[in-house]
Structure formats: C-alpha cells, structure tokens
Image (cartoon, rainbow, N blue to C red):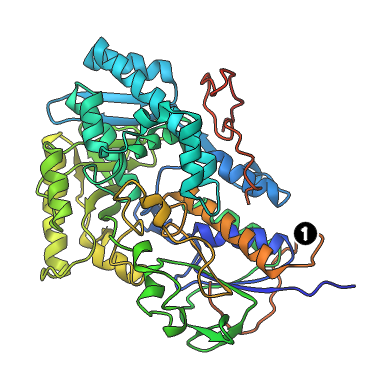
Amino acid sequence: MTAVKKKVVIIGAGIGGLSAALRLAHRGHDVTLLEAAAGPGGKMRTLPSVAGPVDAGPTVLTLRPVFEALFTEVGSALADHVTLDRLDLLARHFWDDGTTLDLFCDEARNEAAVGEVFGSTAAAEFAAFSARARRLFAAFDAPMMQAADPAQTALVAQVLRQPRLIADMAPLRSLASHLRTRFSEPKLAQLFARYATYVGGTPARTPALLSLIWEAEAQGVWAVRGGMAALARAIEALARQKGAVFHYDTRATRIVRQSGRAVAVETEDARHTADAILFNGDPRALATGLLGPAAANAVGTGGIEPRSLSAHVYAFAAEFRGPEMAYHNVFFGHDPIAEFAALEKGDVPDDATLYICAQDRLRGPVQGPERVEIIRNAPPLSDRPDSAEKEKALCQTLIFDRLDTFGLRPDPRPMPEALTIPREFDALFPASQGSLYGRSPQGLTAGLKRPRARTPLPGLYLCGGGAHPGAGVPMAALSGKHAAEAIRTDLGSTLTSPATDMPGGMSTDSRTTDSALSPSSGSSDRYSRPGTPGPDGATPRTTSA
C-alpha cells in the first residue's frame, strides 16, 4: 500500500523552521515553508558592505554536535555542506584601564591566563567556577535542553540524585550576586555575568543556574566559513533536495481553524491546507492575534512575558586602528550595575559593554577594510517618543565614543543604514517588540515557562528561539527537532522509508504558502572538549573542525 503523504506548512525560515523542514522532508512528508524575507536564516541575516556580506545576527556557534546529529539523521554529514573552523581563542576581553584577558578552548590555558592577569587566587576561583558550570551542564542538558517537554519533577529528581547540585545552582541567588560571592576579582564577575545577555537577560534578574552557559562555550566555539548565514543556506539546500518547497517574500496572514484544529495557512494570495502547521516566529505574534483569532489562545502570557532584551546592531566594513582584535571581542562598560539597571528600566545606558565580531580575523589581522558586527544591548521596544533618526544618532555617538576610550577607531565611521535598532527588529520579526530572545530568563523556573512544541490548538506547533529550549542557534535547532518529532508522532505517519534526495526540489503547489537529533540518550559526552573528564572520570570523545 502506498503511504499518503502528510502536508506540513512551516511559517518562517529561521534555524528552527529549517531544521524541522529538513527532518520532515527526509521522512517523506510534503513540506512547504513560507518566509516573509527574501531568503533563509531568520535572525541569521547579513547586510551588504564594501568588503562583502557581513553578519548582522548571531555570530557564536557552539554545541557543534547538535548540527552534526541533524545532518547525520538525514543521511548526510555536516562537513560535506559547511566548513567550520574551531577557534583556539574563544574571545578577547578589554577593560578601559588597559586590562586584557584572552580565554581559550582549553581549560588549563584559561586557568593560566586568568592567573597571569589577575593572580593565583583568581585562577583558583576560575577553576572552581568552571567545574561548577560543567557539573550543572552535565546534569541539566538531558532533562532540560534535550527533553521535548521538560518536567520540574525530572529536574528535582536530578538534584536528589546529586545533592551537590543545590550549592552549584545557588537557587536563591541571581547570576550577578552568585558571581560576586565566587570571584574576588570584580572584572571576572563582570565577564561571566554578561552571559545572561546570551539569552536576553540581565545579570541581576537571571538565575545563577545559567552560569552553565560558560560550559557550552568552553566546549568549543566555531566560525562558519561564509558567515552564519551559510549554515542556514546549507540546511535549506539539503531540505530542497529532500523535496521541501520554499516560498520567500511570502508573508503568512492567517491561520485557519476548522472543527477545532488548525487546518490551513493563508497568505495575501493563497490558501494552503495542511495536516500540521509549524510556526517558527516569536510566539507573541500568535498571542496578539497577528495571525488571526484562531491561534490567539495557542500561547499563554506566561510563555511570552516578561520580554527579553533587544540590541543596537551595527554591521559594516572599515579599516580599524587601535588594539588588536580577535574574532570575538568584548569591550566592557565601566559600571555594569548602572548599565543593567538602565536596561531594566527600559532606558538606553550611557555607558555599555560592546561586543565586536571581526569576522575576517579568523587568521589574524586584516589589511584594508574588514567586516565587523557591533552589538550593544538595548531594552525592547517601549513607548519612548524618540524618532528612529534620533535614536540612531544617539547610538552612534555612544558606541564610537566608547570605543574611542579604548583607542579603537573605524575609518570611515558607518552610515545610519548599517545600524539596526529595536523598532526595526520589531518590523523584521513581527510582534516581537524588538525582543531578540523571546521570553526573558527572569526567575529560576523561567526555562520551564517557554512554550513547548505542541500548542493547545491541535495541528499547530511551535519552534524557534522563543519556544523551548530557548534562545541561541543550537537551542533553536533543537526546538525544530522537538517540533518535527511531535508532528511525526501526532500525524501517525505510515511512511516507512526516508525520502530520496530530489535535486532541485519538488513543487506541489504553484502558488505561495506559509513557513532530530535522535531522542536523547542522556549521555554526558554528547558535547565534549579536549581533555575534559566526564562525570564518571573518563575523557569523552571530541570533535574538531
């Protein structure tokens, strides 16, 4: 008997939607993806510059095994589609008193570097911090990030099995207060407190548990040849070969409900019926009714509020004079408490930390114009009366005056069109309020409040950085895995063999329409770094670029 293909319509070509499209197409489903932008990637976007396309979104790629597993699951290999370079130097950190600290992908080198800059006490404190982050990551990876529907009982059970985790978690402390008790050197507390911004939080409101983010980075950071968008293009191309159909410059306008389930997606000029609909966008767009009343109750307020941070993002090319940058660089603000207090009040801080990705410095200094992305944290969209022009002018002054204190000067300074501000992010990602990470990580149980892949509306599913397991490129990819598995399970597909690659893709509709890892084994060596013992004392396997 010939299996009947199930129709899946995916709204949005972010990394979550792309990873789900690839998995579902590989399993033989009839996949159509709709995207309002001109190409794939979502927040993994680029802007033009005199030196070529420059990343204007995420730049840090961690947890490489997540992507290796994606390609392996569909009968391919990551290395056959994308070239990744493992960074020996994770990031270079600058303070305005002249202090500079390099951190590496090697634990011993990091301890030595911290000791050389800040002394033996700081080195010992850093080693203890790293060990705690490693334990937390190993404990909560499987029951939290890898689980499609994490339960608080599973997390409690993990803690009961390892009571030492209670002290590591510091459940009554914020990340900021926890780090102040662990580091006698304020600069190190400032450095690791900044990891709260990786998921759109502020250190004083983010739980100490998220110190485990350091372990994700310590396991390895990779640079994508051709920029982060090259990863999105590679997944899209492979999904096309599996038969998925992509329609760009196509905005979904309404999700249609019939007989109590989601059954179709409407665009400006078409209606696309579906057995399952996957929404890869900010869940707030559903809750606010942006896609019609049928889906408005699919996401509760607790899954989208409070909002996470936004950003002011410059992407341009110029020649730089001043201190030698690495690939990833952080220029710290002078007063982190004042900086984040302003952000929490919805204000733009006068003095703020700046992150710079110098994406042409993979192999050292560059002659001539080089491509850079500068990110300055900003509050999400508010009722502030300032015009876009005034906000951009202020932001330009604050950013380049701050860099000037470090002696770093671009020539020429970029034009305003190279800067993206929160209200522009809100336009790019509708109903997001410019928030780049969905719900804020505020509170110890914030991770359990993000919406899951299945929504209360049968036939409608979620993925992306605003859904579980949260923000970041690997997490968004995992959300796509969770959604694909939920769809396959719920559709009860009788398809028994993966789809055969179809060069050029297969179109099943002449008009436009809307846009896994294998189940977790719980293995603690899912991710690894050289020479780092696992919880059982064994040295886990590692991957290299």
Q: Mark 1: which amino acid?
A: Pro
Location of residue 60 in the rendering, given as x and y in whole percent from the top left corner? 41, 42
**Is residue 462 at all visible to an observer of this figure?**
yes
Q: Residue at x 39, y 35 (%)?
A: 212
**Is residue 371 at all visible to an observer of this figure?**
no
Q: Is residue 131 left or right of residue 538?
A: left
Mark 1 crowd level (few <14, some 14–19, many ≥20, 10 Å Cα): some
Quarter-of-image position of residue 69: top right
Q: Is residue 187 left or right of residue 386?
A: right
Location of residue 39 in the rendering, given as x and y in whole percent from the top left corner? 49, 66
Given residues 357 and 450, the one toward you in this image is 450
Q: Residue at x 17, y 53 (%)?
A: 344
In the rendered image, the quadrant that contains the N terminus is: bottom right
Q: Is residue 452 left or right of residue 302?
A: right
Against 539, residue 152 (above or below) is: below
In the rendered image, the quadrant that contains the C terminus is: top right
Quarter-of-image position of residue 109: top left
Label 1: which secondary element? loop
Given residues 356 and 345, the one toward you in this image is 345
Against 192, residue 276 (above or below) is: below
Given residues 320 and 154, the one toward you in this image is 154
Against 312, residue 5 (above or below) is: below
Q: Residue at x 35, y 28 (%)?
A: 167
Outermost residue, right direction?
Answer: 1
Q: Is residue 445 left or right of residue 395?
A: right
Quarter-of-image position of residue 263: bottom right
Location of residue 365 in the rendering, given as x and y in whole percent from the top left corner? 34, 31
Q: Which residue is mark 1?
A: 498
Given residues 77 and 125, the one toward you in this image is 125
Q: Residue at x 40, y 46 (%)?
A: 59
